[in-house]
Image (cartoon, rainbow, N blue to C red):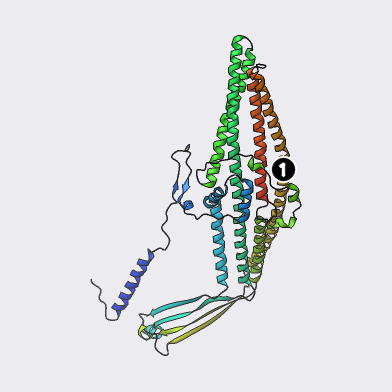
Amino acid sequence: MIPQFNGSAWPRASLVLSISLIGLALVGCSLAPVYERPAVTLPTTLGGEELPTSSSAQAQAPVELTAPERAFLASFAPDRDLASLVVQALTHNADHRLALAQVEQARAQYRISRADQLPAISAGAALTRQAFDNRELNARYEQRLASVTTGISYFELDFFGRMKSLSDAARARYLASTYGEQTARGALIAEVLRAYTLERTAAAALARAQSISTETSALLHVAALQRQTGLASQDDLDRQQAQADQADVAARQAADDHRATLRALRLLTGRDVVPEGDVRTLAMPQAHVAALRDIDSQLLLQRPDIRQAEAVLRAANADIGAARAAFFPSIRLSTSVGTASDGLAGLFDAGSGTWAFMPQLSLPIFDFGRNRANLDLAWTRRQAGVVEYENAIRRAFREVADTLDARATLAQAERLQSEEAARAQRRLQRVAARVDAGLVDRSDLLVERIRAEQSALARLRAERDLALVRVATFRAFYGVELQSSL
């Protein structure tokens, strides 16, 4: 049976059908971007030397270094350019890019909080059709209304400062995120310099370990010849064999250490770097420890981690104001002006104007302790912020004190090791002269060469420790305006 519609029912049915079809069509729409897995290029095998690279990292714009950062890099390694290495790390390092993204998130949240303090003006259009099958109800309640309005919806009058407190808290958290980014930046620069120092030390140590292994193998060959001629016992040959095996293992371990430090440096910078230079230049301090000790302690409060902790404390303090304001009445205003008519054709005719003004007062009476719990939570977070601020100051002073103490001791150790290495070289020259004159055996020269290499290794480690403590000093004073170089 085909349904029959009279003249009045057919337009209503077609309208309902059209609206339903439009609604079904809009249900499938989505404004979300199409998800794509981030493209990351991985090595072919787990043992491959290639670095995992990301397309998002390659699209980043280069980061500019600040004047204090460039000054320290120039004093840390005046004979080479480390600025490009640090810029590469700041541009492509995932942790630093994440810190920058968190700053942008906090900035957007602060903008939202500021916008909540201002009235939002919006425009709207409405078409109302209401009909009943019952004639009496239809005659009484039937509606045909079209309207176009613009106005303000639910704007809160901030008499008790709730919105301002929320905005202040968002601003403090935004500042905390910027200081957090600076902290991450300083830590990343220090880590790059530390990795560079360790790689240069490992490269030099590898050369020394290979030289010691070569000289020990030569001694083993001499001991084998002496055993054949009866000049050495089997125990002497066994001891020399053990020393040769130990030297060979040490050389292999040095090669592994160098590959590990080079891999760490490449992962930090995001590229296949080929470092150059030695460690000796990096171990030349430019500032006197006494000058650093005499600096006003208030300057240390400029450190970004301390500023970050203070900004978090300010945000927690502002949250208390917002929690207190929740106990008082809130007043919201809604207003609109526009035009309305019983048909679209007469929507903008004279006499169709309309306006509405709807103030709303809300006072919490029974909330089962929600507002009180929110206030207690805000106070607890503030107390935790005070503790964290105090801990940040204590950590800063401990880091500075530790680096200054270690710097003086390591500088003395490096000087003594350099003198010992120089004495070992002079002894080696004297033994070489005696060998050339035929006064001593060649095995004595090999033994002295091994001792000289071991002294050079000890000096290398002392230079490494002094260079690392310079990096630690830079990290401890990062963000602090100093007159002298580190």
Q: Is residue 223 left or right of residue 145?
A: right
Name the residue: 65% across, 74% down: 160
> Residue extending furthest bottom?
351
Mark 1 nearby-residue class (10 Å; few <14, some 14–19, many ≥20):
some
Query: Disc 1 on helix, strand or loop?
Result: helix
Q: Amino acid at mark 1?
A: Ala
Q: Residue furthest front?
A: 437
- Residue on which the image places disc 1: 406
Viewer-side residue, 151 vs 454: 454
Tell me what residue is drawn at x 53 percent, y 47 percent. Answer: 269
Seen in the image, is 137 located left or right of residue 103? Answer: left
Where residue 442 appears, as percent x and y from the top left, is: 63, 18
- At a point 76% along the width and 52% down the height, the residue shown is 294
Q: Is residue 122 left or right of residue 79?
A: left
Compared to 250, does 281 lie above or below?
below
Q: Is residue 346 above or below residue 189?
A: below
Instruction: Residue 398: give x, y in percent of width and height.
Output: 72, 49
Q: Residue furthest left?
A: 1
